[in-house]
Image (tube, helix red, strand yellow):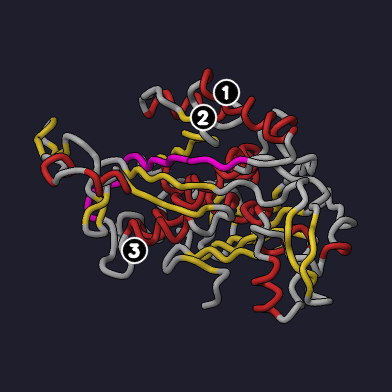
Amino acid sequence: MAGNSIGKEFTVTSFGESHGKHVGVVVDGCPAGLAFSEADVQVELSKRLPPQPRIVSARIEKDVAEILSGVFNGFTTGAPIVMTVANKEVDSSDYAAIKDLPRPGHADYAARVKYGGFNDYRGGGRFSGRVTVALIMAGAVAKKLLSQFGIDVLAYTVAIGKVKMGKVLSFEEIRRRRYETSVRCPDEACAEAMENAIVDVRKEGDSLGGVIEVAALGVPAGVGEPLFDALDADIAKALFTVPAVKGVEFGAGFKAAELKGSENNDAYAVRDAVVAALTNNAGGVLGGISSGMPIVARVAVKPTPSLAKKQQTVDLSRMEEATVEVKGRHDPCVVPKAVPAVEAAVAVALADHLIRAGCIPKVLRQERK
C-alpha cells in the first residue's frame, strides 16, 4: 500500500494537489447502514475556514463536497465512499518564477529529488495544507460513525506563539465554545490575544505556530493492537499526516520526564461501579491500549514557512546560492485551519481501531428509508 493510504479496516486514501482540479478521498471499510450525506461533510468542511479574514489567506475556497459513491438512499452501502472538492480559487502565477528556488521550510527540494522534478510544485502541490480537505472529509465519516457509539472527538487551540491558554475548562465548555472564536480557542479572552498576535506578526511579514490539544471522549478500555499497531502510535501517525505538525505527545507527554513515578502514575478507584483513574497523565492509553479515560494528545504546529521576508535558498537551475521572497496568498498562522484536521485525524484512527476491536460491527442495524 502506497503512502497515500492509512488504516487497516477503515482505510482512507487521499488524492489531489493544492492547485489541481480536485482534492478528494476514498474511504473504504465504513460499515453499511450509517446515515450519511453531503450535509454531514459540509458541517466539517465549514470548520476549516476561520471567519476572521485578517488572520487567514486571501484564498477563500467554498469547499463544496460531492459524494460520488458509497451512499445510497441516505445510508452508507458498505462500498468505498468517494468524496471530492473542486479547487476553484486557484492562482498559480507566482509559482513558475520560483520553481527552481526551493522555499525554506517547505518540501520543495525534498519532493523534487524524490520525484525527479515531475511533482506539481504549485502551491506546494501534494504537500500543501490544502490536502487536509481530504482528511476532513474522511473525518466526517469517522466522526459520524463514532457518534453512534457515544464517542466524541474535540480539538482546540491551546497556544499560538507565546500566547497560551491558562484557563481550565470542562470538556462540555470546550465542545460548546471552541469554534466560536476565529483561532478555535475556547477561552474568549485568550483567543483575542492569540488573534492580535497573528495580526501583529503578519504586519512583520512573518508567521507563528502553536499547539492544538485534542481529546477523544467515550472510548472504551481495551482498544489497541500492541506492539506495532499500538493505539497511541496509530493516532500519532494519523496526526503527522497533517502538514506542519512537528510533534505529538499524550497526557503529561514530555513533562512526564520531570516527574517521579509516584507523581506520574494514575491511581485507580471505583466510581459508580466502574474502574476509573484519579488522574490522566497517561493520556488515556497504556501499553498501546485504551484505558477507558479520555484520550488526550497535543500537537506542535510549526510557523507557516511561506514568508514575505527575503530568505536564503539556492537556484537549482544554476546550482548557486540565491534568495527568495514568497509571494501569493498565505496564512500567517495555520493553527486555526489545522484544528478540524487534527480532529479528523484522531477520529479516523479511532474508527479503524474500534472496527478492528469488534466494538463497531460491519453493518449498523438502522431502519432503512
Q: Which residue is mark 3?
A: 356
Q: Tell me the number on the disc at residue 214.
A: none
**In the image, what residue occupies the spot 26% across and 51% down?**
285
Determine whether 162 is above or below 264 in the image.
above
Left or right for 72, reference 232:
right
- Tell me the crowding category of disc 2: few under 14, some 14 to 19, or many 20 or more residues within 10 angstroms, Cα based: some
Which range of residues does the magenta coloring cover?
A: 208-222
As helix, strand or loop, the secondary structure at mark 3 comes to: helix
Q: Tell me the number on the disc at residue 163.
A: 2
Left or right for 356, reference 349:
left
Left or right for 280, reference 18:
left
Q: Tell me the number on the disc at residue 193.
A: 1
- Residue 250 locus on image (x, y percent): 33, 48
Q: Is residue 101 magenta?
A: no
**In the image, what residue occupies the spot 24% across and 39% down?**
280
From the viewer's side, name the closer residue of 248 and 49.
Answer: 248
Residue type beneath disc 1: Ala
Between discs 1 and 2, the one toward the N terminus: 2
- Tell me the crowding category of disc 1: few under 14, some 14 to 19, or many 20 or more residues within 10 angstroms, Cα based: some
Between discs 3 and 1, the one toward the N terminus: 1
Q: Quadrant of residue 223?
A: bottom left
Between discs 2 and 3, the one toward the N terminus: 2
- Residue 42 locus on image (x, y percent): 65, 41
- Tell me the crowding category of disc 3: few under 14, some 14 to 19, or many 20 or more residues within 10 angstroms, Cα based: some
